[in-house]
Amino acid sequence: MSQIDSVSTSQIADSVAARSNSDASSDWIMHHVMDGNYLDFSPFGKIYLPHIELFGIDISITRHVVIMWLGAVLLGLVFFNVAKSYKKSLVPKGSANFWEVLIIFVRDEIAKPTIGKGYEGFLPYLLTAFFFILFGNFLGLIPFSATFTSNIAVTSVLAIFSFMVIQIGGIKNNGVFGYFKGLIPHGVPIFLLPIMLIVEILGLFTKPFALAIRLFANLTAGHIVIYALISLIFVMQSYLISPVSIGMALFIYSLEVLVALLQAYIFTMLSSLFIGMAVHQDH
C-alpha cells in the first residue's frame, strides 16, 4: 500500500512539474511583451530597476517608464533643436525640414479639416500627442527596448488627456449649459430624451475608451505575432522552419513600421475629430 502511495505521489509530482514547465514555456511571449522591473538585454543579461515605495504605495520604476522617459527626453531634444534652427532662419535646414513636414501634416491634414475655426488653440496638444506616440512606437521597434505605448496605463492616460481637452474645448466654446444641451440631437421626441441623454453621456466616455484600447491593442498584437512566429522554431524543434519563421517575422516587423506611423495618426486624428465635434456642435 505504501509503495502504491509513493508511486501515485511521484506521478502527481511529475504531472505538476510538467504542467508548470508547459505554462512557463507558453508564457514567455507575454513575458517579453508586458512590463517588468528590469531592462531586458537577453541573452546578455538583465538590469534590475530599484523598488520604491512611498507611504505603502508601490511607485517602482519599470522598463516602460524608463523608455517613456527616454522618449520624452528625445522628443524635447529634437524640438529644442528645431526651434533653435528657426530662430536662426525661417527657412528650415537639415533635419528641421523633416520635422516641418510632419508638423505641417498634423496642422493641415488633421487639425484644420476636423476642428476648423479655432484649431490653433488645440494644435500644441495634438502635436505633442502625435510625436509622443510616434517616438514611443518607434522606440519599441529597437532591439532590447520596450513599447510603452502598448501599456494600457499609458494609453489610458493619453485618452484621459484627450477627454479633458475635448470637454474643456466644448465648454469653453459653448458654455456649460450650451455644451451639454448640444449633446442631444435636435428634433428628438420628448419620450426618447432620457434614453438619448444616457446614450450621449456614455458616448463621452466610450470615445476616449476606444482611443486607449485601439492604440494598446494594435501595438501589443504586432509584438505578439512577431514573437509567436519566432517561437515556431522552438515549438517545432527544427532549424528547417527557421527561414520561413524569420522571414515572416521580418515581414510583420516591416508592417510594424507602418503601424507605428498609422496609430500615431489615428489617435491624433480621432482626438482632433472629437474636439471638433465638441467645439462646433452646430456642424
Image (cartoon, helix red, strand yellow):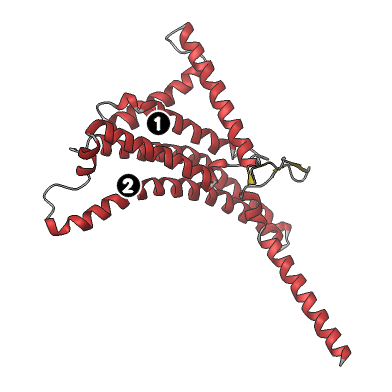
Q: Which residue lies furthest to the right in this view?
A: 3
Q: What element carries label 2?
A: helix
Residue that carries the numbered disc 1 in the rendered image? 126
Q: For marks 2 and 1, give the CA distance.
A: 19 Å
**CA neighbours of label 1 inside 10 A, class few (<14), some (14 to 19), many (20+):** many
Quadrant for the N terminus, please.
bottom right
Tell me: residue 17, above or below residue 169: below
Q: Which residue is drawn at 55% across and 46% down?
A: 151
Give the quadrant of residue 130.
Answer: top left
Mark 2 belongs to which amino acid? Leu
Residue that carries the numbered disc 2 in the rendered image? 204
Q: Residue at x 45, y 50 (%)?
A: 213
Q: Residue at x 58, y 42 (%)?
A: 147
Whole-percent x, y for residue 55 in the image = 64, 43
Mark 1 or mark 2, which is nearer the start of the sequence? 1
Q: Which of marks 2 and 1 is in front?
A: 2
Whole-percent x, y for residue 202 in the image = 32, 52
Whether residue 1 sits left or right of residue 18 in the image: it is right
Tell me: residue 14, above or below residue 78: below
Q: Residue furthest top?
A: 88
Mark 1 belongs to which amino acid? Leu
Whole-percent x, y for residue 85 in the image = 50, 11
Give the quadrant of residue 275.
Answer: top left
Cβ–Cβ under 8 Å for marks 2 and 1: no
Q: Can residue 168 be seen in this view?
A: yes
**CA neighbours of label 2 inside 10 A, class few (<14), some (14 to 19), many (20+):** some
Q: Which residue is drawn at 36% across and 35% down?
A: 165
Quadrant for the C terminus, please.
top left
Give the quadrant of residue 17.
Answer: bottom right
Nearer to me, 104 or 198:
198
Q: Is mark 1 on a helix, strand or loop?
A: helix
Whole-percent x, y for residue 25 in the image = 70, 61
